[in-house]
């Protein structure tokens, strides 16, 4: 809202990581745990916690041969989400201009600029840095669920054509509304679409109760 008042335009990119919890590299995780001050004894405990895990597939009461699990953190565990958050906690350090919001495996980058040219340049530069970070940490994105949106006043939005925002040399789809953490945010920061969607869900639930 402050940027709108200052006649700036803001671009936001919603990054969706692919199987994020399942691709955590144990060696890199140990290095990050060490870098934030975990003691040797605790690191040894985490090594034991993550090691010697196996998985099997069962079909019609037939079980496959157990296979070792060498990457990832245990899902549906208390420590799994915490370890993943530690794993990506240094992500903002790869960004020079954009601000970021991290929530589990949902990442949002945003930048405010005076003009479209600056916005496009900065976002693409930061996404290049982000792709380098993701490669280093063995993380990948879901291209079909990675979106970007421009926030600006109604009149200014009319003058803005589609931007060429890319990551891994693939263009990111521009949306007029973006859903983040269950909330629909429109490009002009109107809550009408979110309220309409919410009312529709409420009416469906009421219909079931009747």
Image (cartoon, grey):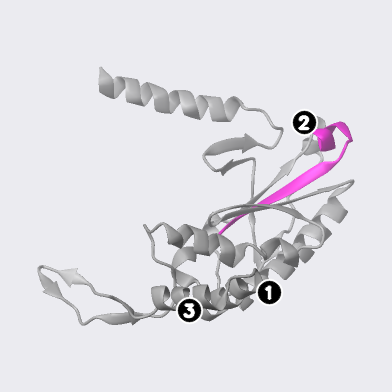
Which image quadrant for residue 88? Answer: bottom right
For the N terminus, the image quarter is top right
Please state which of the two labelled residues, at mark 1 or mark 3, is closer to the viewer: 3
Up the image or down, 182 lies above or below 116; here it is: above
Q: Is residue 147 magenta?
A: no
Q: Earlier in the sequence, mark 2 or mark 1?
A: 1
Residue 25 to residue 147: above or below: below
Where residue 107 appears, as percent x and y from the top left, is: 61, 55
Q: Position of residue 186 (x, y in %)?
A: 65, 35
Badge number at residue 101: none
- 29 sits left or right of 95 in the view: left
Tell me the quarter of the picture where residue 37 sits.
Answer: bottom right
CA–CA distance between discs 2 and 1?
35 Å
Q: Which residue is mark 1?
A: 132
For disc 2, the marked residue is 154
Give the percent coordinates (x, y) of residue 72.
Answer: 44, 71
| Camera-nearest label, 3 or 2 | 3
Q: In the figure, is residue 86 to the left or right of 153? A: left
Specify few, some or many for label 1: CA neighbours under 10 Å numbering under 14, 14-19, or 20 or more: some
Numbered disc 3: secondary structure: helix
Q: Quadrant of the C terminus?
A: top left
Residue 165 sits in which quadrant? bottom right
Q: CA distance from mark 1 to mark 3?
A: 29 Å
Depth check: give the residue in front, 193 or 29.
29
In the image, which residues are magenta? 1-17
Q: Which residue is mark 3?
A: 44
Name the residue at 57% across, 29% down: 193
Please give the name of the residue rendered at 45% of the width and 74% of the height, measured from the top-left corner. Answer: 45
**Mark 2 or 1, which is nearer the eye?**
1
Please give the name of the residue rendered at 46% of the width and 23% of the height, measured from the top-left corner: 199
In the rendered structure, which disc, 3 or 2, sits on the residue that comes first in sequence? 3
């Amino acid at each position: 809202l402050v940027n709108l008042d200052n006649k700036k335009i803001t671009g936001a990119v919603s990054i969706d990581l692919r199987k994020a919890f399942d691709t955590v590299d144990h060696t890199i995780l140990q290095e990050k745990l060490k870098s934030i001050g975990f003691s040797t004894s605790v690191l040894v405990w985490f090594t034991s916690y993550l090691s010697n895990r196996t998985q099997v597939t069962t079909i019609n009461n037939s079980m496959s041969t157990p296979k070792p699990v060498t990457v990832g953190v245990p899902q549906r565990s208390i420590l799994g989400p915490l370890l993943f958050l530690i794993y990506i906690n240094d992500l903002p350090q790869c960004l020079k201009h954009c601000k970021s919001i991290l929530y589990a495996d949902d990442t949002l980058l945003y930048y405010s600029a005076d003009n479209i040219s600056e916005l496009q340049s900065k976002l693409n530069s930061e996404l290049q840095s982000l792709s380098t970070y993701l490669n280093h940490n063995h993380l990948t994105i879901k291209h079909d669920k990675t979106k970007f949106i421009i926030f600006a006043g109604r009149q200014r939005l009319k003058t803005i054509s589609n931007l060429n925002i890319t990551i891994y040399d693939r263009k990111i789809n521009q949306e007029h509304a973006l859903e983040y953490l269950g909330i629909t945010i429109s490009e002009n920061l109107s809550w009408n679409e979110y309220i309409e969607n919410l009312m529709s869900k409420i009416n469906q639930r009421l219909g079931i109760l009747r």
